[in-house]
């Protein structure tokens, strides 16, 4: 029962008790008063009538006429004249019922019984008889009933006013309680927000306790996240340059090469610092470390304009740069070469050698052949000289459409002819139960169904990603009624930043909300980092509609996610690079275990991406992973 209903119930009970008490007291007092007044009236009327009769001749007809006139002129129940020996001389009585407003049950419940008035009638010096007058009580009962009704009306009016006033007062006083309820609901949704403290002492204590709880959980999660990120950096990054180390870089490269949902094309750039030992002797250890850091900073700074790029240090003297979805390798090579040559020129006193090689790869390239060809190209660059540069291609199979206009026409034709299709990749629990299907886009281009990685990079350059994401969402909404499974769709960074896309998406979802509990929308970790405010607004809007929200490819920059505990995520997909050869990597196991622990403390489902075999399931269960996706469950 709500507090308002309890208030009205309390006021109603109070009014009933107050009315009952007032009714008993007032009715008893009024009844006694009316009985006294009727008794006095009976005595006065009997005395007056007896005096009049005493002065008249005692003619029976005259006496009867006088008594009848008196009876008809007043409200009497009975007037009787009896002789001294008790015989009735004249009597007038009203045997009917007085028509009053008081109901019978009230007259029976509150009876009025007034004593009759008696007076002696004289005939000279002798007693002629005794006159008895009894007034009718119906009018007194009616008066008592009307007073009771007025009392009830006043109590009802006061009860109504008290209820309305109490409701308004309670709404004002309990407004902080609504804030506490919202805060509690936010905590239930894994958003640890703070509320302003009210002036009401009792509510202030409650809000203070809730805020203290949120602060403690927030501080605990932030501390664990910082510690986990520091551990991750120690595990995955080079101590001198801060760049990703060999194992981590190659795991990311493998993920790019084998990810069906994203572009499996790009460019890899490798540079080698020649004669590192001689440089170390010439410059000293401190200055050599500074040189290595500057090379790392150069590699990290050059591709800053491109998304999902990564620079790494694969060994003491080799630096590498991965730029997915970059077909113009020549321009990239020129950009990196210029920056590195400027750095080399600053160390002319030690004859610094920094040859470089670039290699473009396509969607059929494997890491082994790619790195072998890149090493060969780097060896050729070393033969050229300290600033040698060699460009190669890891695959002869290039895109069928070379210009943006060609791609625009090809994509338009594909959408017009065969339309958009959705693939299905299962995401399952470790026990094999289906969580949902990932549904990447599919287009039939040049007579062959192409995965998203084939055409998405070109749609990004054409500025059509938001349009593609909206079509995927609409297609998923069409398929949801025809199956029992949940469907997950991916939203790009471009869509997050497009306010018109968000409006169109929410409008499309509102048209039919019956299946939205089985629709999952997820964003890449890097997209959320680029547009945190937009992602938070999107989550707020979609959660109200009942959709599930997830984060994919999480892990590399997990600690940079601001206020993760306030977002309200339903699940997180951990990047597959963290699971490469995880059985033999204790450090990676500890990191994944810590990541899952933080997620579970927020009530978030943790899913591992890129799992190739079921052999790792036992280990993943021990680490706290809830579900998997990849070849092992496809």
Image (cartoon, rainbow, N blue to C red):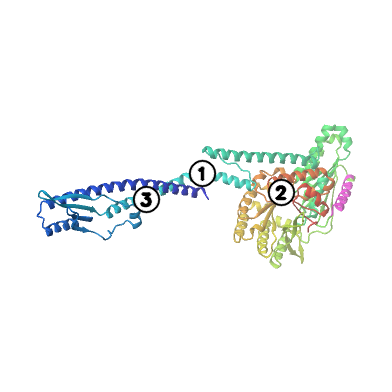
Element marked by disc 2: helix
Asked if marks 3 and 2 touch (Cβ < 8 Å), the reply is no
Mark 3, mark 2: which one is toward the viewer?
A: 3
Report the residue marked by disc 1: 174
Residues rendered magenta in the picture: 366-382
**In the image, residue 378 lies in the stretch drawn in magenta:** yes
**Residue 557 in view, yes or no:** no
**Could you tell me which quadrant the C terminus lies in?**
bottom right
Provide residue 427's location: percent of width, then percent of height: 74, 56
> Residue 362: which quarter of the image?
bottom right
Q: Residue at x 34, y 52 (%)?
A: 110
Q: Which mark is residue 525?
A: 2
Report the residue marked by disc 3: 152
Depth check, front residue: 276 or 345: 276
| In the depicted structure, whether residue 216 falls above or below residue 446 | above
| In the depicted structure, whether residue 96 falls above or below residue 590 | below
Q: Residue at x 65, y 57 (%)?
A: 517
* Lateral position of residue 596 relative to residue 193, left or right: right
Depth check, front residue: 418 or 476: 476
Q: Residue at x 57, y 46 (%)?
A: 181
- Compare marks 2 and 1 and give the one earlier in the sequence: 1
């Amino acid at each position: 029962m709500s507090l308002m209903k309890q208030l009205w119930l309390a006021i109603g009970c109070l009014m009933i008790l107050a009315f009952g008490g007032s009714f008993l007291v007032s009715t008893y007092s009024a009844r006694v008063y009316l009985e006294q007044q009727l008794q006095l009236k009976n005595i006065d009327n009997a005395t007056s009538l007896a005096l009049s009769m005493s002065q008249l001749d005692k003619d029976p007809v005259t006496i009867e006429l006088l008594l009848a006139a008196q009876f008809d002129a007043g409200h009497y129940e009975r007037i009787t004249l009896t002789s001294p020996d008790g015989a009735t001389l004249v009597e007038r009585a009203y045997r009917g019922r007085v028509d009053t407003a008081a109901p019978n049950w009230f007259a029976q419940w509150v009876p009025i019984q007034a004593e009759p008035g008696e007076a002696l009638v004289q005939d000279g010096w002798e007693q002629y008889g005794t006159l008895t007058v009894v007034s009718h009580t119906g009018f007194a009962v009616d008066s008592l009933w009307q007073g009771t009704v007025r009392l009830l009306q006043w109590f009802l009016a006061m009860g109504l006013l008290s209820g309305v006033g109490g409701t308004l007062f309670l709404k004002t006083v309990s407004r902080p309680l609504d804030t506490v309820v919202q805060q509690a609901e936010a905590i239930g949704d894994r958003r640890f927000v703070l509320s302003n403290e009210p002036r009401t002492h009792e509510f202030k204590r409650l809000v203070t306790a809730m805020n203290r709880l949120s602060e403690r959980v927030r501080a605990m999660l932030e501390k664990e996240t910082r510690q986990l990120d520091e551990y991750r950096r120690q595990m995955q990054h080079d101590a001198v340059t801060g760049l990703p180390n060999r194992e981590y870089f190659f795991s990311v490269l493998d993920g790019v090469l084998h990810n069906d949902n994203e572009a499996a094309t790009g460019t890899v750039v490798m540079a080698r610092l020649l004669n590192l030992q001689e440089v170390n002797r010439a410059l000293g250890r401190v200055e050599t470390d500074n040189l290595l850091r500057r090379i790392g900073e150069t590699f990290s700074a050059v591709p800053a304009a491109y998304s999902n790029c990564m620079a790494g240090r694969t060994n003491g003297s080799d630096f590498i740069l991965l730029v997915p979805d970059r077909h113009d390798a020549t321009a990239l090579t020129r950009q990196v070469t210029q920056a590195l040559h400027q750095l080399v020129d600053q160390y002319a006193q030690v004859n610094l050698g920094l040859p470089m090689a670039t290699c473009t790869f396509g969607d059929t390239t494997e890491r082994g052949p790619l790195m072998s060809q890149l090493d060969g190209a780097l060896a050729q660059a070393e033969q050229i000289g300290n600033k040698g540069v060699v460009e190669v291609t890891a695959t002869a199979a290039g895109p069928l459409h070379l210009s943006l206009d060609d791609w625009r026409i090809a994509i338009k034709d594909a959408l017009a002819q065969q339309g958009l299709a959705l693939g299905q990749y299962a995401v399952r629990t470790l026990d094999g139960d289906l969580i949902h299907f990932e549904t990447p886009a599919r287009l039939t281009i040049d007579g062959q169904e192409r995965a998203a990685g084939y055409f998405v990079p070109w749609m990004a350059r054409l500025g059509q990603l938001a349009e593609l994401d909206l079509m995927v969402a609409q297609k998923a909404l069409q398929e949801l009624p025809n199956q029992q499974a949940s469907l997950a769709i991916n939203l790009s960074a471009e869509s997050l930043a497009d306010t018109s896309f968000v409006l169109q998406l929410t409008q499309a979802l509102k048209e039919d909300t019956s299946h939205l509990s089985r629709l999952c929308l997820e964003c890449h970790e890097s997209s959320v980092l680029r547009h945190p405010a937009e992602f938070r607004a999107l989550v707020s809007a979609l959660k109200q509609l009942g959709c599930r929200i997830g984060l994919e490819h999480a892990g590399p920059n997990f600690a940079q996610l601001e206020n993760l505990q306030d977002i309200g995520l339903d699940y997180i997909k951990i990047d597959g690079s963290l699971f490469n050869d995880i059985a033999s990597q204790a450090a990676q196991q500890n990191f994944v275990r810590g990541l899952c622990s933080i997620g579970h403390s927020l009530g978030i489902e943790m899913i591992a991406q890129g799992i190739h075999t079921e052999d790792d399931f036992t280990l993943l269960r021990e680490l706290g992973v809830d579900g998997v996706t990849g070849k092992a469950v496809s």
